């Protein structure tokens, strides 16, 4: 059940569609006044119009469990970031050389969804599954930005790994953030061409607040592989929350 799509709630479909087209070279598959479906190589992004009357519960503090950001592999972080910055997009982090040998930058879409640019292949401190790492490297340098991962903060990696294993996601590598006094590490769960980037901390994390209909990230859509809803999830509205509050939907539902 790899990631088929990411749903992002937006106030204005045309504005957001133009943003993703220009800055992430997304290709429009369909569009109406209420939604747009964008191809980002290994998945799609569905922009879904909301009225914007609700305020997002998302926080910039990565100790808040649940959704953190959407990541895209790119060929040149600095070049793309320069255009994004010059167009006045809200910036979270200018390009830096990050742990693991990649060059990254963070910025926000028009409705506050945090997006990451990642240039280069990660050099893991611990390789757990060499075949999955080799499959990741085999994707090569993208000709246009491609969806790579959704990042999530969790309370227990072991619980998260057990939850996603029946959905086909497997742990393939770990990055240690030794400079971070909070005891920060990143583990990666891979299924097909999509990845869940799992943040854990020795420091205490904060319970998530799911607020359906607010602008920003809405849900991860998984390809239908049967067995829905996932064991251990919490049903809410038309989604299922994983143990740390990340909303999941089934493709076609």
Image (cartoon, grey):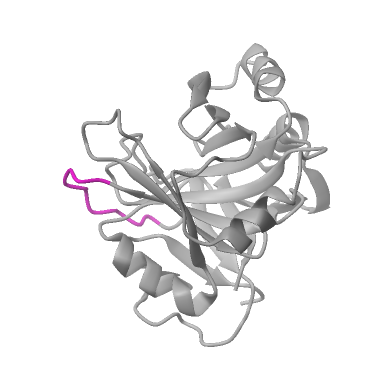
The answer, for residue 236, to whether it is visible in the render is no
- Residue 205 in percent (x, y) is at 21, 48
Q: Is residue 58 magenta?
A: no
| Place of residue 127 in the rendered image (x, y in percent of width and height, measured from the top left) | 49, 53
The total of numbered circles placed on residues is 0
Magenta residues, as a range?
A: 201-211
x then y, percent, for residue 248: 49, 67
Magenta span main SS: loop
Depth order, front residue of 1/61: 1
- Determine the residue positioned at 56% across, 35% down: 116
In this view, the residue in front, 217 or 100, is 100
> Residue extending furthest left?
204
Quadrant showing the N terminus: bottom right
Residue at (66, 12) in percent of width and height = 86
Asked if residue 103 shows in the view, the reply is: yes
184 relative position to 149: left or right: left
Q: Quadrant of residue 95?
A: top right
Residue, x 62% and y 62% (percent of image)?
131
The x, y position of residue 16, in whole percent, is 67, 37
* Residue lying farthest to the bottom in this orientation: 227
10 to the left or right of 201:
right
* Most distant residue in the top direction: 86
What's the residue at 72%, 35% (across, down)? 24
Q: Is residue 242 above or below residue 140?
A: below
Quadrant housing the C terminus: bottom right
Q: Is residue 139 left or right of residue 105?
A: right
Report the side of 226 relative to 171 (left or right). Answer: right
Q: Image height check: is 150 above or below 179?
A: below
């Amino acid at each position: 059940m790899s990631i088929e799509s990411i749903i992002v709630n937006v106030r204005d479909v045309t504005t957001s569609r133009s943003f993703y087209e220009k800055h992430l070279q997304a290709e429009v598959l369909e569009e109406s006044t209420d939604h747009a479906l964008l191809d980002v190589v290994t998945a799609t992004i569905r922009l879904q119009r909301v009225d914007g009357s609700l305020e997002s519960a998302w926080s910039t503090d990565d100790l808040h469990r649940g959704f953190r950001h959407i990541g895209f592999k790119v060929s040149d972080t600095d070049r793309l970031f320069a255009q994004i910055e010059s167009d006045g997009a809200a910036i979270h982090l200018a390009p830096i050389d990050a742990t693991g040998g990649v060059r990254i930058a963070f910025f926000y879409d028009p409705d506050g969804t945090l997006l990451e640019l990642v240039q280069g292949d990660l050099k893991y401190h611990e390789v757990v599954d060499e075949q999955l790492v080799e499959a990741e490297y085999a994707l090569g340098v993208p000709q246009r930005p491609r969806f790579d991962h959704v990042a999530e903060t969790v309370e227990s990696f072991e619980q998260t790994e057990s939850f996603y294993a029946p959905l086909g996601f497997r742990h393939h590598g770990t990055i240690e953030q030794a400079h971070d006094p909070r005891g920060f590490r990143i583990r990666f769960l891979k299924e097909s061409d999509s990845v869940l980037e799992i943040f854990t901390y020795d420091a205490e994390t904060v319970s998530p607040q799911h607020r359906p209909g607010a602008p920003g990230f809405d849900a991860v859509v998984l390809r239908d592989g049967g067995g829905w809803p996932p064991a251990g999830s919490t049903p809410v509205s038309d989604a299922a929350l994983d143990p740390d509050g990340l909303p999941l939907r089934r493709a076609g539902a």
